[in-house]
Every structure is written in C-alpha cells, then in structure tokens.
Amino acid sequence: MSTEASADKNISFYVNEPPINSDVETFFANYASIPSSALREHLINIRQRAWEKRNYPCLGRWAFLDFSIQQSPIYQEILDQCKNHGATLIDFGCCLGQDIRQLVYDGVHLDRLRGYDLESFFIELGYELFCDGEVMKENKIFTVGDIFDDDFLNGVEPADYVYVGAFIHLFDTPTQREVCRRLTRLAKRAITGRQVGASIPGEYSRTFDFPSSKSMRHSPETFTQMWNEVTECAWQVESAYLKTAYNMKSTNERLTFVVRSHEQK
C-alpha cells in the first residue's frame, strides 16, 4: 500500500477521535495501567501507526476498541469452558489482539489462549497498545500465521473454540469457502465471530488493497448456505444475525455468527 493511500484520512470509514467511554477507560486503567488523562494520546499514537501500515476499516473506525468477542452469543459459554473446564480458544486474524486481552481481563488463563495474524507488525503494536509485551512474549501467546499455509496449519493444535473477527469477509466468494474449510481444521467445537454483512448479499468492491478486489458480504441465509455446502452440514450455523452499526461518517451492517461442529473432535 502506498504512503499516499496510508495517509488518506478523508475516506468514509476514518474517524478522527477515539470513542473513549467509561468501559474503555476502565479497561485500560485496570489492564494496562493507563490513566484516563493519558489514554486519548496513547490510542491516537497507536492507531496512527497502524493506519500508516494498512488502511483497514476496523482501524479507521476504532473497531479494536469494541472488544467484539463480547458480542458473541456464546461468549459466556466460552468464558465458563475456558475458565472452569480446560477449554482453549484461538483468535485467528487477531490484528492488535484486543479480544485475547478481553478474555484475559475476564479471567481466562493465558495457557488457554492463542492468537495468530498474518503480519507481525500488528502483533508487536498490540504489545504497545496493551502494555503487556513481556508477559505475552514469555507465554508465546501470539504467532504469525497464514490461513493458506498448510505447513503452518498442520503444526497448530486445534482449539475448542476459534474466534474470527473481521476476517472471513476479507475474501471473495470462492476464497471464503476455502477459508471456512481451513478454519474447521483449527476448531473442535465452535467457530464464532463478527464481520461486515449485507441484507442484500453480494460481492462488493474493496476500498483497500487486501487481499483481493472483491469482498463477499453475506446475509444470514447465504452465510448458512455457504457453511452447509462447504462442510456438507458437518458444521452448521447455530446463530447468525445482522445489526446496523453507525459512526459519524458511515453505516454498515455487521453479521454476528456461531457455527457449531456436529462431529466434535
């Protein structure tokens, strides 16, 4: 991506000010020991550096402050199983790793968690964002990984749960189908996540250069159909719904989903 593209702050999904509220202040004060008086400057600095690397909508909209895993319909199940019954979770396409931190904040032990992203830059920047690089590196929580690398996938121990926030929607229709097949190799029980969706499903032109020029945006019905076809109903959509999200410059529909294995490993 060119420097010129990375510097563009006029596109519809770029919001200047971080959406700091009491929940965000409390999280960063308790998790990262960042006082509210220093939080705005800290967040702006991190987001600026991330934006210079990639013009991702999730960065432009400050979506990494949503801690979106909390909106999963099975979040309480994940917490209970990971905290009390030894279950594990992989966050794939974790970017800055905010959802791993939310799980830790809510009491899940580090040895239950792993995060993978294509770019080490975002993993390293996440250490700065959350001020926890030493403990995260010591426990080897985050690793670079490519969903299309079979050698990598073969070396990953499957987890009970896989979280994919703003990941599957990055790809066109045939590539999404392959991504879903590969995600089932990493999960034992369920795959859950949130991504851009559409009441009128279809392939939309991308507004940034990764990884293809088209992005398939699903309705709950087409998302369910894709999983049924790809896995021959071995994995079935348990929950999928659209919700409209608003910010100061644009609106978009978000698809929240749970896909459950009917052949638990």
Image (cartoon, helix red, strand yellow):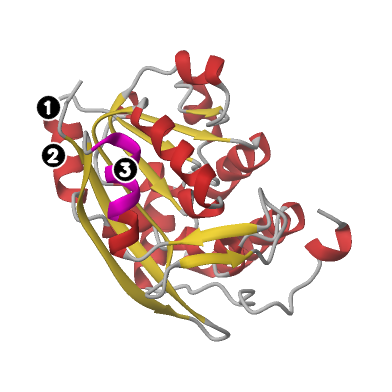
Task: Say if mark 3 contacts mark 1, CB within 8 Å.
Answer: no
Who is closer to the viewer here, 225 or 137? 225
Q: Position of residue 88 (x, y in %)?
A: 27, 28
Circle 3 sits in a helix, a strand or a loop, which is it?
helix
State the predominant SS element of the stretch in magenta: helix
Is 231 colored magenta in this rendering? yes
Give the distance between the C-alpha atoms of the residues marked 3 and 1, in whole angstroms. 32 Å
Q: Position of residue 184 (x, y in %)?
A: 34, 31
Q: Quadrant of residue 55?
A: bottom right
Identify the residue at horizontal 59%, vertical 77% (top origin).
17
| Kind of residue indicated by mark 3 | Glu
Label located before the other in sequence (2 or 3): 2
Identify the residue at horizontal 55%, vertical 34% (top origin).
133
| Kind of residue indicated by mark 1 | His
Task: Determine whether, in the image, residue 212 is placed left or right of residue 221.
Answer: right
Look at mark 1 in the image and give the residue it sits on: 85
Quarter of the picture containing the C terminus is top left
Look at mark 2 in the image and give the residue it sits on: 80
Q: How many marks?
A: 3
Look at mark 3 in the image and give the residue it sits on: 229
Label located before the other in sequence (2 or 1): 2
Identify the residue at horizontal 22%, vertical 38% (top origin).
233
Circle 1 sits in a helix, a strand or a loop, which is it?
loop
Is 18 colored magenta in this rendering? no
Identify the residue at horizontal 65%, vertical 37% (top origin).
119
Task: Say if mark 2 contacts mark 1, CB within 8 Å.
Answer: yes
Magenta residues span 224-232
Other-residue count near label 1 (Cα within 10 Å), few / some / many at <14 / 14–19 / ≥20: few
Give the distance between the C-alpha atoms of the residues marked 2 and 3, in whole angstroms. 31 Å
